[in-house]
Amino acid sequence: MNKLHKMHNTNAGRVFDVFNYIFLGIFGIIMVLPFIYVVAGSFSTELELTTRSFFIWPHTFTASSYKYIFSTNTFIRSLLITIGVTVIGTLVQLFFSFTFAYPLSRKQLKGRNGLLNFVIFAMLFSGGMIPTYLVVKGLGLLDSYWALILPLAISPFNLMIIKNFFQEIPVELEECAKMDGCTEAGILVRVFLPLSKPMIATMSLFYAVGLWNDFMSPLLYMNDSTKWPIQLLLRQITVSSSASTALAEYDPSIVPPEQGIKFAVIVVATLPILMFYPFLQKHFAKGMMVGSVKG
């Protein structure tokens, strides 16, 4: 640490820091500008969107696009479906991942090596789109919200990270819990999970982001448009020549801002998951590294 501090105090280190900050600042601005444009466009008039190719501050503010999309049952229903699938799906994934990772982390488990090999195989090779679709269809899950949750119930990669994290917990804690009369389930709930807050926070974020942004699963398994989540509806709106027609419910006497509607839907579909991150930020950095070293 002292050597690293001395290196940054040299002239070469200071020059590197300056160029590093400049490069990262420019790179960050390039990444953020498109989203700022979408946000600004969602509060702009249709005339301004058609006459100005790019802007980050509208000349005339209007919330007509947001008023319009929230006045339609189609959009609100899709948003609620996505929220429900994300919340329930994240809980299901956390439950199966942690309850499966715990026995895999116990070296005394009979058949442990075979299960680990099975998980590693599943991590490297997947069944593919068509076999997965046939399984979902055979289980009668088409047009069911469970089709968006159960095929993604366990991520083999995340499972291995959780397993490695559990192996780093001192075995003495487990032995003390057994002396106090705890069962294996009690050890998991009372010892391992309270020590796993960074891991739970990190995996919750990963699973929630994956479920919220999942587009392929509803595209494959949801034929009923009334059960579409927000990402599939967003795709329909952005590729449609008329955003109001894609929403399927509008007043013919009102001329909605077509481009503004698309921008507003993009903002609403993106903001919730961005707002979810700050609540887990303090655990995220630690959870990213923990459990990723030992095998």
Image (cartoon, rainbow, N blue to C red):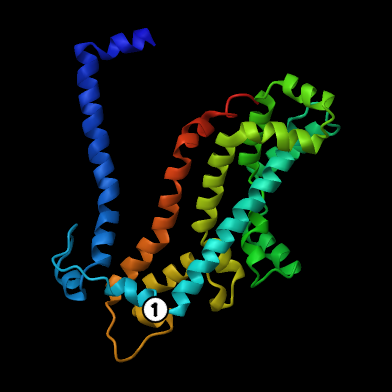
Residue drawn where x is 27% and y is 85% of the image: 255
Image coordinates of residue 3 in percent, x first then y, are 35, 8
Image coordinates of residue 23 in percent, x first then y, are 24, 34
Is 71 drawn above or below residue 281 in the view shown? below
Crowding around mark 1 (Cα neighbors within 10 Å: few <14, some 14 to 19, many 20+) is few
Q: Is residue 230 in view from this perspective?
A: yes
Is 201 drawn above or below residue 9 in the view shown? below
Taking the image as shown, residue 163 lies to the left or right of residue 265, namely right
Residue that extends furthest to the bottom in the rendered view of this protein: 253
Q: Quadrant of the C terminus?
A: top right
Question: The residue under label 1 is which amino acid type?
Answer: Ser
Quadrant housing residue 105: top right
Image coordinates of residue 192 in percent, x first then y, are 69, 32
Taking the image as shown, residue 284 lies to the left or right of residue 101, namely left
Q: Is residue 229 in view from this perspective?
A: no
Out of 114 and 176, give the one closest to the viewer.
176
Residue that extends furthest to the front in the rendered view of this protein: 180
Quadrant housing residue 52: bottom left
Out of 129 and 156, give the one closest to the viewer.
156
Residue drawn where x is 19% and y is 57% of the image: 56
Residue drawn where x is 33% and y is 71% of the image: 66
Q: What element carries label 1?
A: loop
Which residue has dot 1 on it?
Answer: 71
Residue drawn where x is 67% and y is 71% of the image: 142
Taking the image as shown, residue 179 lies to the left or right of residue 288, namely right
Image coordinates of residue 138 in percent, x first then y, are 75, 68
Q: Quadrant of the N terminus?
A: top left
What is the tally of numbered marks visible in this picture? Answer: 1
